[in-house]
Image (cartoon, rainbow, N blue to C red):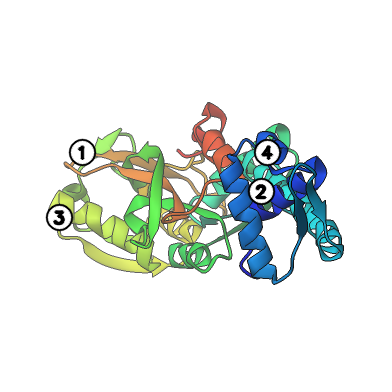
Amino acid sequence: MLSSTLRQLEYFVATADAGTVSEAAVRCGASQAAVSTALRELEKALAVQLFVRRTAKGMTLTRSGARVLGVARRILDDAAELAELARAEHDEVAGPLRITCTSALSPRVLPVLAAAFAHRHPRVSLELTDGLAVDVQGAVLRGDADACLLYRRQLDPGLEGRTVHTIEPYIVVAADHRLAGRSAASLRELADEPLILVHSAGSRRAIETVIAEAGVTTRPGWSFANPETVRAMVARGLGYSVFSGRPASTETFDGGRVAYLRISDPVSPNEIVLGLPRGQRPNARLAALERLLTTDEVRSSFG
């Protein structure tokens, strides 16, 4: 729009409507000097004379000024509409929201979250996906997703992690394991048994951190991409595992059963976090997501 500004156009339209600079200044809440300066700068930028200035008779539009006036009104109307759209984007809980989640969390969290949005914010169009920690974070960093849910120990430094729930790590053993009847156990008590892990980089790193804090040397076992495969192997008595958090069900997909034991070693709790691009400007949909993640309805799904 050349070098003219919306403020200059506002003063120009006000002057054309009012007929005088003084009345235009009153309507715009500005000084007469500011309006006069803006009109001179606008004429200079457009290289046309907009008004004929007559002492005691006020301001009269030139032929060029009359043509510019129609365009200026449209520009100001479009700018007002754009501002209204921006306010709606910021304040209205409606429109698209793309959430991605690690596979370890998605079976527990996404169905509850989807139902909560459908009930409380039906005008939000959810796009839900899941995958490995590296993939869901990559989607957010690329702009393919608005936010992701994962464990803090998996968090990429390029993302801001907002804590939504704190969880304890658990030992997972078969339901008929010698320790299954207890509420807690030390990792040292399982040092002679194979440790079966989820092998994605983020998940494995999180569990290795827990083991390092416990100061225990483990016996390596198999590793799998699917956490349900890990649980099924454990249920068959083929080893034990360590999970961040405790799923609600003790039954595996093939009908086996596992037991969850708190770790009695001095290990730090983990956190489920909402991963967002650093410096991202908030909007109403993301604010609604954060509120829902703190409700009892959704928090109970975290384990």
Task: From the image, tell me which residue sits under label 2.
Answer: 86
Q: Quadrant of the C terminus?
A: top left
Looking at the image, which residue is at 31% across and 67% down? 221
The mark closer to the camera, 1 or 2, is 2
Report how far apart the C-alphas of labels 2 and 3 lie in the structure.
55 Å
Q: Residue 216 bears which disc, if any?
A: 3
Q: From the viewer's perspective, is 155 left or right of 229?
A: left
Mark toward the start of the polypeptide (1 vs 2): 2
Task: From the image, tell me which residue sits under label 1.
Answer: 264
Residue type indicated by callout 3: Val
Report how far apart the C-alphas of labels 1 and 2 lie in the structure.
52 Å
Mark toward the start of the polypeptide (1 vs 4): 4
Contact flag, marks 2 and 3 (Cβ < 8 Å): no
Task: From the image, tell me which residue sits under label 4.
Answer: 22
Q: Nearer the viewer, residue 115 or 48?
A: 48
Q: From the viewer's perspective, is 247 left or right of 43?
A: left
Secondary structure type for disc 4 = helix
Q: Position of residue 180 (x, y in %)?
A: 33, 40
